[in-house]
Amino acid sequence: MDDTSITLKERVEYDKLSFYYISLPVLLIGHLLGALLLCAMQLTVVDMYSIAVWLLLNIVMFFYRFYHYTLFKKENEKNKLRDIRLWRDRYYTNVLLSGIIWGSSAFLLFPETSLINQMILVLFLFAIGFSALGVLATKSDLLLSYVLVMYGPLLWRLFSPEGDIYLAYSVMSLVLILIPVANYYGKVINKSLEEKQHFIDIKASHDKLKERFFSLFERAPIGIYYYNDALRLQDVNVEFVKMNEVENKKDLTGVTLYGNLDESKIITAHESVFSGRTGRYRGPFKINSANRENLYVDLSTVPMLNRDGEVAGGIAIVNDITGEVAAQEKMMRNAYYDMLTNIPNRTLLMDKLKNLIEAKRMVKNYGALLFLDVDNFKKTNTMFGHETGDKVIKQIAYTLEEVLEGHETLARVTGDKFVLLIPLAGNSKAEAEKTVQKYASKIDRRFSQALKVSGNEHHLSFSIGAILFADTKKTAFDLLKQVETAMYEAKKTKGGSLQFYEESMGVEVEEQLMLENDIHSAIRNDEFVMYYQPQLDVESNEIIGAEALIRWNHPQKGFVMPDAFIPLAEESGIIIKLEEWIFDRIFSDIRSMIRKMGRFPLKHVSINISTVHFLEPRFVEKLMMAVKKHDVKPEWFELEITESGIMRNIDDAIRKIRELKSFGFTFSIDDFGTGHSSLSHLKELPVDVIKIDQSFVRDMNDDDEMIIEAVVAIGQKFNLEVLAEGVESSEILAYLQDIHCNTYQGFLAYTAVDLEVFEALLDAKK
């Protein structure tokens, strides 16, 4: 029987039974000695035979009950609890038998002629009875039975004609007094046993609670410690020991927090418990005796009360948030700093520029913004590769920082483009212009010497655009756009030149802004349409797929090609909204095509994805929402991404490609061969198709043929399909067949056509 399944009543019953058996040896010895003494005293007035019979019965009963005592003592507690009724009935039966034997003395040892010996017998019976009634009193029915067998024969004998009537009434009076007294005593014993068991249960619960609390305290996955009113540590748990990187508790217990913790806020959090309040602290935590450096905690304190309900100290619960803080700092750093160069990025630059514009409305002086673009940096990437290009960019950033005086902000806004923000360029426009020219000259002189990177010398110059601003209504975005415009004007002049922004340059910017607004309107007014250019198998010349291409049916300008608005859409960020529209339209077109043709008739439809959109955090989520909305299958679509775009954040790109491939999408690298990074990263990119850029195919020469053959060989090596763009002659197609290129598209076969014409082409082919 499980200890936890025993009720309080059963436990009390067991305690009573144990009490009976534990006291049994003393009781039995007392009874036996009493029997011997009684026999000795009655020897002269009672015949020897009666004495011998009665004494023998007592001796037999002694050994019989002692035998049961030894059995009870040897039995384990579990079995005794299980057989508690058997042991109880056995004990009660033996008590009654013993009472019967002693009661029989009224017949066997009763001296009819000697009143003194009769009184001796009565005294012995009451003495033995009292010794037994103390045990039997806990059970009233047993008590009455025992009194009956013990004193019934005596009363019968005394009330007989030969008995002494006075002695009879005296005995009866004593019996009548004995019963309620014994009954009361029994209740006292029962209550005592119940209270004892209740105390045991409370103590067991307390011990279990204490054990659980200690276990929780020691094994809790967070740090916990107690401290007194002197802020001295009384006890600490294992996790807090680990957290502080000390060997054991002794290194921390007894340490006072005063003078050990530098932060006043953390001391306040600990002291708050003495006002009956909880405390909270979040920040650095360093105890001088601890080895841990750079520990950050989320700490809560609560009052610890003594028995009188008074605050005796506090309990501190400590959660190690060092990793969380580091992650937040890293996230903040990634949000505001360029990961390659570790200098501010566009976001931090724009924040500082906005604040400076606000400040200039209060202080009447000039600030300056310089936009720096490395001249001909693509050559560096082409000649030395992406890895070296990154090293050069880092070295450029370090070198530019050497030019700074300390109050400026240097930011990398993209690729090989940097922006320098000068908060105080001068109190007048002329003074500010001189300051800008001074910085430009310092940059020119500093980069007049070649940068040495990876054993190679790199001769670099900058095209610099500059703009001055004081109390202006222009936004940070306006200033950045205008200074970039000035940089492009400088680039048109010659490399290594400085160009201040002029308002006449803003005409082109205004046109771009108008075009940007027109794009917003075009999405709302459904002015965009999707065209589809067939993709054909090189060997069979069968249409196996199509590339989806967007066209803009502008209400004033007519059809506008993607090259005229996609770069602006990417730059302004509206490309995300535009490509979400593209997904909706393509998926809708495909669903319409399936309804008409009864099936999906192609291997895939290829969709161009902007890098800006692809690297957007919710790209995968929104794409899958569009798939579910139109009830299309991901395996019907091939997503095209550019190699240069992938390299902006290759880890994120690979993660998203793998996630989308798990849904069924396939991927192709667009414009393969025009960049510098594909060969070094192609092995780790989980793509399916390489697209050879049309610049290598359309006007093919010997160098182009070598590149095309190399790309096809790479595709075969990595088990990738190769698609050639811009096929415009049968000679080029024959060449592609000879080198076993897989797929092609171009004007030789079909131009891009609208959905209706494309469906007609598929019907005709069928």
Image (cartoon, rainbow, N blue to C red):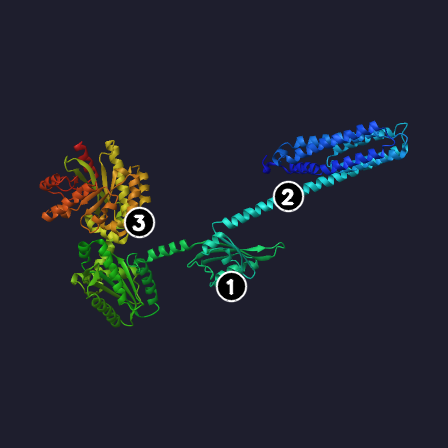
Task: Estimate the x, y position of residue 4 in percent, counting from the top left.
Answer: 59, 38
**Gap in angstroms between the C-alphas marked 1 and 3:** 49 Å
Q: Closer to the camera, 724 or 228?
A: 228
Q: Closer to the camera, 141 or 590?
A: 141
Query: In the rendered structure, which amino acid carries the disc numbered 2?
Result: Ile
Asked which secondary structure carries label 1, the reply is: loop
Pointer 3: residues within 10 angstroms few (<14), some, or many (20+)?
few
- Disc number for residue 616: 3
Quadrant in the rendering for residue 156: top right
Pointer 2: residues within 10 angstroms few (<14), some, or many (20+)?
few
Query: In the rendered structure, which amino acid carries the disc numbered 1?
Result: Tyr
Q: Choose the circle earlier in sequence order: 2 or 1.
A: 2
Asked which secondary structure carries label 2, the reply is: helix
Pointer 1: residues within 10 angstroms few (<14), some, or many (20+)?
few
Q: What residue did someone put label 1 on? A: 258
Q: Choose the circle earlier in sequence order: 2 or 3.
A: 2
